[in-house]
Image (cartoon, grey):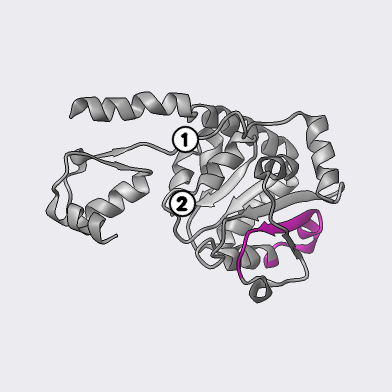
């Protein structure tokens, strides 16, 4: 961090690559940089791992994870730090849902942190696992209501698995949500808007499927193979 700060303050570099427009704008603001010196290249998706499985495979995975068959599986997936990732906002949004909608869903969290601080009767904490791609293919709706996330690879991974995504305008990967999916980039910290988004997607399976198809198509455009030429263009310029 000290090395990066010195380089940025002295601007002793030719090009910088940011992993999102969010980070580009933040860096320009903090260090008064020339925006022409910064290129945005989003991280790559391992498309051979994160892709939509068939309906029969998804049904088997739901059984494997013990998900209720009659519920919409809504999950927040994170590597940890529940405060940063907005688990409390997720909880507030769920609490604002009418019971008629809340009872149609199973709300879950996959991640490491102090679970006891966020324990609620309507919230299930799933154990950690190594095959996160199968978990994504078993759930119906992915949520990341983070207060700040420089990129948020889990968003891209969920997209790759064909999931509808709700996230915030402070998550870099939210910039990848296009067309109808872009409407589900919500204001960070706003539980009311998140409640509205949850309610709509829990009640509309056709919309979930439609958004998942859009997201899977967009995610394919961020494979590792397609990333190399983007880096080459930056390096060849210098």
Q: Residue 21 carries which label?
A: none
Q: Which of marks 1 and 2 is nearer the N terminus?
A: 1
Q: Nearer the viewer, residue 128 or 119?
A: 128
Query: Is residue 184 highlighted in magenta?
Result: no
Q: Distance between the residues labelled 1 and 2?
A: 16 Å
Q: In which quarter of the image is residue 62?
A: top right
In the picture provided, is 12 more to the left or to the right than 161? Answer: left
- x and y, in percent, of residue 24 in the image: 30, 47
Q: What element carries label 2?
A: loop
In the picture provided, is 29 more to the left or to the right than 169? Answer: left
| Number of residues whose C-alpha sits closer than 10 Å to that of mark 2, classed few (under 14), some (14–19) or many (20 or more) | many
Q: Residue at x 69, y 56 (%)?
A: 128
Does residue 193 lie above or below 235 as drawn?
A: below
Q: Residue 171 carries which label?
A: 2
Circle nearer the viewer, 1 or 2: 1
Does residue 209 lie above or below 94 as drawn?
A: above
Q: Which residue is drawn at 69% across and 34% down?
A: 209
Q: What element carries label 1?
A: loop
Does residue 210 lie above or below 191 as drawn?
A: above
- Residues rendered magenta in the picture: 95-113
Q: Which of 134 and 52 is in front in this view?
A: 134
Q: Circle 1 sits on which residue?
A: 44
In the picture provided, is 18 more to the left or to the right than 205? Answer: left
Q: Residue at x 61, y 41 (%)?
A: 158
């Amino acid at each position: 961090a000290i090395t990066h700060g010195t380089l940025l303050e002295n601007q002793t570099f030719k090009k910088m690559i940011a992993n999102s427009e969010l980070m580009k704008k933040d860096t320009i603001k903090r260090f008064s940089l020339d925006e022409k010196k910064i290129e945005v290249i989003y991280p790559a998706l391992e498309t051979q791992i994160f892709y939509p499985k068939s309906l029969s495979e998804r049904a088997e995975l739901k059984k494997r994870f013990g998900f209720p068959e009659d519920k919409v599986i809504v999950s927040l997936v994170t590597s940890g730090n529940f405060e940063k990732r907005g688990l409390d906002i997720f909880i507030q949004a769920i609490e604002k849902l009418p019971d008629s909608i809340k009872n149609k869903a199973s709300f879950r969290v996959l991640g490491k942190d102090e679970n006891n601080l966020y324990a609620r009767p309507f919230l299930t904490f799933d154990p950690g696992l190594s095959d996160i791609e199968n978990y994504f293919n078993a759930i119906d709706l992915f949520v990341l209501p983070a207060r700040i996330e420089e990129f948020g690879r889990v968003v891209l991974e969920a997209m790759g698995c064909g999931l509808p995504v709700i996230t915030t305008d402070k998550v870099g990967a939210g910039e990848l949500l296009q067309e109808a999916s872009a409407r589900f980039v919500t204001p960070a910290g706003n539980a009311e808007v998140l409640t509205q988004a949850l309610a709509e997607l829990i009640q509309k399976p056709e919309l979930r499927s439609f958004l998942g198809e859009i997201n899977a198509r967009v995610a394919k455009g961020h494979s590792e193979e397609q990333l190399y030429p983007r880096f080459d263009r930056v390096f060849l310029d210098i």
